[in-house]
């Protein structure tokens, strides 16, 4: 109330009367019994347009990712048309930090591949909390009144989760960077620092072939800075004939954290956030080497298991080739016609050439369906896909 202008206060709260602030213990008891408090915020804009609606929707969606405890109902009217959307969170995950706990929206809406069929599919993600990195405040920002301790907390989230299917091929296609202020409000607008960051990263150490900044719009989470991951040229004909890999994306949250013992008024905190956002590029450039190294470390730690997964899958493909070659050699070299005919009949094939392709496909399906349950996953039963004309290999 004190932060509002007198005329705005009278306009918004004409009947407001002085009252004591609520007791924290009573307020906690009330919310535990009746649920969280709800805030209805109504505002009007002159010269509103669908473009403004899309920008506000993007901002609210980005805000809800890092504030999963807050439910937002967005309603927009334009030219006798009403557009509304609820930003509700289905799956939350708590990532504990040094100064505060982060409640993130880890819901993944990517549909499972067909090979999963009746199995379980993880509908969430598993954020990885990085180390806290202290930042030095540049002199220009200090001259404007920005003091105290400033740091960043990085959190990575890889989705969709395929931990329960270790043999499914995956492909990281995009990395998205979202920056949030000390109060978890997303920092809007393009960032020159993060747009130029790929040129200073050692992609080979991370396990990637290359990164370049893009304006990819077909992402679940809009906003921030988006990098496109360069893909390896596949020269293996066996791998080219395999099904398309699961396309994954990586969210890199950058949470700015600020503390100042002399800043405790709401108006001072808001002014500090404005200063941080205004001087964010200078702050990042002033700590360029440290921030670049921190991002490099977070990407490396997050993708370490992913790179090991690819190595294990390569070993499995090599073993499958040995199994395939041995099986075909036994059938082809056998002089017992009854045995050969029985093998061909069980696989519904007419000759050994067709048997090779059929057995290869059967081995791929069996290994791809391997399911390893994980307690940390948000598993849900997948509905069976409609029946197709493609025959199933239940014989294996």
Image: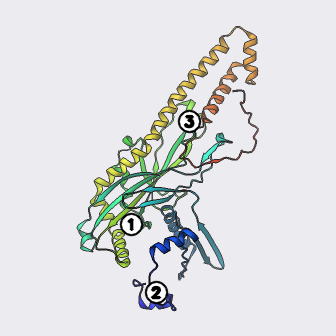
Foreground label between 1 and 2: 2
Rendered position, 136 above or below 381? below
Other-residue count near label 3 (Cα within 10 Å), few / some / many at <14 / 14–19 / ≥20: many
Sequence order check, earlier mark of 3 and 2: 2
Q: Residue furthest top?
A: 335
The residue drawn where x is 45% and y is 77% is 23
Q: CA distance from mark 3 to mark 2?
A: 62 Å
The residue drawn where x is 65% and y is 39% is 115
Q: CA distance from mark 1 to mark 3?
A: 40 Å
Foreground label between 3 and 2: 2
Q: CA distance from mark 1 to mark 2?
A: 29 Å
Label 3, secondary structure: give it.
loop
Q: Is residue 235 visible?
A: no
Give the side of residue 241 with respect to residue 264, left or right.
Answer: right
Out of 380 and 114, give the one closest to the viewer.
380
Q: Quadrant of residue 279?
A: bottom left
The residue drawn where x is 61% and y is 22% is 324
The residue that label 3 is drawn on is 167
Give the side of residue 283 with respect to residue 355, left or right.
Answer: left
């Amino acid at each position: 109330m004190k932060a509002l202008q007198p005329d705005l206060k009278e306009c918004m709260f004409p009947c407001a009367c002085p009252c004591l602030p609520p007791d924290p213990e009573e307020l906690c008891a009330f919310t535990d019994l009746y649920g969280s408090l709800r805030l209805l915020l109504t505002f009007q804009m002159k010269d509103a347009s669908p473009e403004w609606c899309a920008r506000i929707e993007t901002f609210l969606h980005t805000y809800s990712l890092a504030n999963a405890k807050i439910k937002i109902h967005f309603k927009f009217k334009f030219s006798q048309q009403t557009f509304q959307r609820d930003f509700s969170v289905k799956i939350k995950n708590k990532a504990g930090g040094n100064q505060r706990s982060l409640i993130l929206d880890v819901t993944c809406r990517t549909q499972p591949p067909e090979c999963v069929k009746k199995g379980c599919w993880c509908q969430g993600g598993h954020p990885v909390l990085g180390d806290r990195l202290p930042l030095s405040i540049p002199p220009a920002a200090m001259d404007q009144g920005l003091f105290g301790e400033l740091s960043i907390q990085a959190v990575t989230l890889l989705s969709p989760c395929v931990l329960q299917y270790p043999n499914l091929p995956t492909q990281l296609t995009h990395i998205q960077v979202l920056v949030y202020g000390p109060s978890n409000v997303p920092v809007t607008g393009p960032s020159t620092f993060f747009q130029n960051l790929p040129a200073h990263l050692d992609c080979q150490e991370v396990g990637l072939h290359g990164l370049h900044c893009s304006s990819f719009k077909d992402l679940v989470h809009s906003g921030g800075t988006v990098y496109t991951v360069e893909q390896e040229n596949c020269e293996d004909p066996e791998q080219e004939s395999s099904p398309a890999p699961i396309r994954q994306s990586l969210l890199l949250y950058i949470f700015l954290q600020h503390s100042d013992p002399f800043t405790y008024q709401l108006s001072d905190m808001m002014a500090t956030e404005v200063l941080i956002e205004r001087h964010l590029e200078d702050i990042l450039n002033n700590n360029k080497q440290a921030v670049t190294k921190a991002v490099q470390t977070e990407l490396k730690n997050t993708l370490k298991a992913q790179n090991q997964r690819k190595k294990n899958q390569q070993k499995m493909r090599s073993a499958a080739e040995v199994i395939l070659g041995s099986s075909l050699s036994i059938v082809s070299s056998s002089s017992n016609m009854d045995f050969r005919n029985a093998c061909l009949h069980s696989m519904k094939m007419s000759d050994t050439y067709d048997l090779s392709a059929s057995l290869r496909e059967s081995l791929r399906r069996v290994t791809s369906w391997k399911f390893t349950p994980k307690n940390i996953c948000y598993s849900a039963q997948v509905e069976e896909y409609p029946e197709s004309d493609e025959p199933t290999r239940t014989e294996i």
